[in-house]
């Protein structure tokens, strides 16, 4: 009996330790980093931003599937035309979710791909808008919960300011350096 209790206690400690580590890079952590104007993220922190966005994206995918099932099964009091409208929006969201997943995969492999980061930001903004609309719709609000605002927070203050903006500034400084050298070369040739 004591061995079972001891094994259970060890498993509980392992679970507590692993969740404590993931709590280190919570949404609150990145929002505080953003509010302190510390825009430099380490490579590990950038990877964790992408992992957390992937986690919220998985929640959005599950909610999108649940909403589709609810509409198709007729569990809600929605008229046919309105149901068709919502199904078209949910289909758009499924495509956006797939696109975000692809963009996350690319950014995890090559974190300095600016165009992919811009596409990811746009897709996150679109998804957060749609999920906020779903949460404000009485028929869907119980299923959607707070995923819309969470997507918004991961997209705008966190991803935009801590990942995308520094990446764009780094790319901008890379492209400006050769231009200055060319101007100096033309001036020396004229003299």
Image (cartoon, helix red, strand yellow):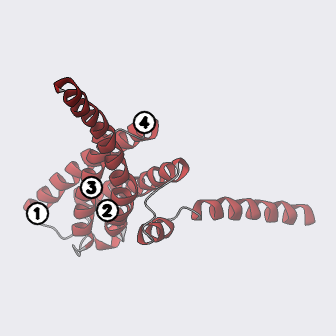
Badge 4 is on which residue? Answer: 110
**Marker disc for residue 156:** 2
User: Residue 169 at x, y = what percent?
Assistant: 32, 49
Q: Nearer the viewer, mark 4 or mark 1?
A: 4
First-in-chain label (2 vs 1): 1
Residue at image location 34% in from the left, 41% down from the top: 103
Marks 3 and 2: in contact by CB < 8 Å? no
- Tell me the distance, in whole angstroms, between the alpha carbons under discs 4 and 1: 42 Å
Left or right of 2 on screen, residue 53: left
- Tell me the distance, in whole angstroms, between the alpha carbons under discs 4 and 3: 34 Å
First-in-chain label (4 vs 1): 1
Q: Which is more toward the observer, 166 or 27? A: 166
In the image as oriented, which residue stretches furthest toward the front?
A: 191
SS for callout 3:
helix
Quarter of the figure that contains the C terminus:
top left
- Tell me the distance, in whole angstroms, between the alpha carbons under discs 2 and 4: 21 Å
Q: Nearer the viewer, mark 4 or mark 3?
A: 4
Badge 1 is on which residue? Answer: 82
Left or right of 155 on screen, residue 93: left
**Marker disc for residue 40:** none
Q: With respect to residue 85, does 5 lie above or below? A: below
Residue at image location 65% in from the left, 64% down from the top: 20
In the rendered image, which quarter is residue 77 located in?
bottom left
User: Residue 106 at x, y = what percent?
Assistant: 39, 37
Q: Which is more toward the observer, 159 or 184? A: 184
- Tell me the distance, in whole angstroms, between the alpha carbons under discs 2 and 1: 30 Å
Q: Nearer the viewer, mark 2 or mark 1?
A: 2
- Tell me the distance, in whole angstroms, between the alpha carbons under discs 2 and 3: 27 Å
Q: Which is more toward the observer, 103 or 61? A: 103
Residue at image location 46% in from the left, 64% down from the top: 38
First-in-chain label (1 vs 3): 3
Badge 3 is on which residue? Answer: 68
């Amino acid at each position: 009996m004591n061995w079972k209790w001891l094994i259970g206690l060890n498993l509980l400690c392992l679970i507590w330790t692993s969740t404590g580590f993931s709590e280190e890079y919570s949404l609150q952590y990145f929002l505080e980093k953003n509010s302190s104007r510390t825009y430099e993220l380490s490579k590990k922190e950038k990877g964790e931003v992408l992992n957390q966005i992937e986690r919220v994206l998985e929640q959005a995918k599950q909610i999108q599937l649940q909403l589709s099932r609810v509409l198709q099964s007729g569990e809600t009091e929605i008229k046919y035309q309105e149901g068709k409208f919502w199904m078209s929006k949910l289909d758009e969201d499924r495509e956006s979710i797939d696109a975000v997943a692809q963009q996350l995969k690319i950014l995890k492999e090559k974190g300095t791909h600016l165009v992919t980061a811009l596409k990811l930001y746009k897709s996150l903004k679109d998804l957060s808008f749609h999920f906020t609309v779903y949460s404000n719709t009485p028929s869907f609000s119980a299923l959607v919960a707070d995923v819309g605002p969470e997507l918004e927070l991961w997209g705008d203050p966190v991803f935009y300011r801590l990942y995308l903006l520094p990446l764009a500034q780094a790319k901008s400084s890379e492209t400006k350096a050769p231009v200055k050298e060319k101007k100096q070369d033309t001036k020396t040739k004229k003299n």
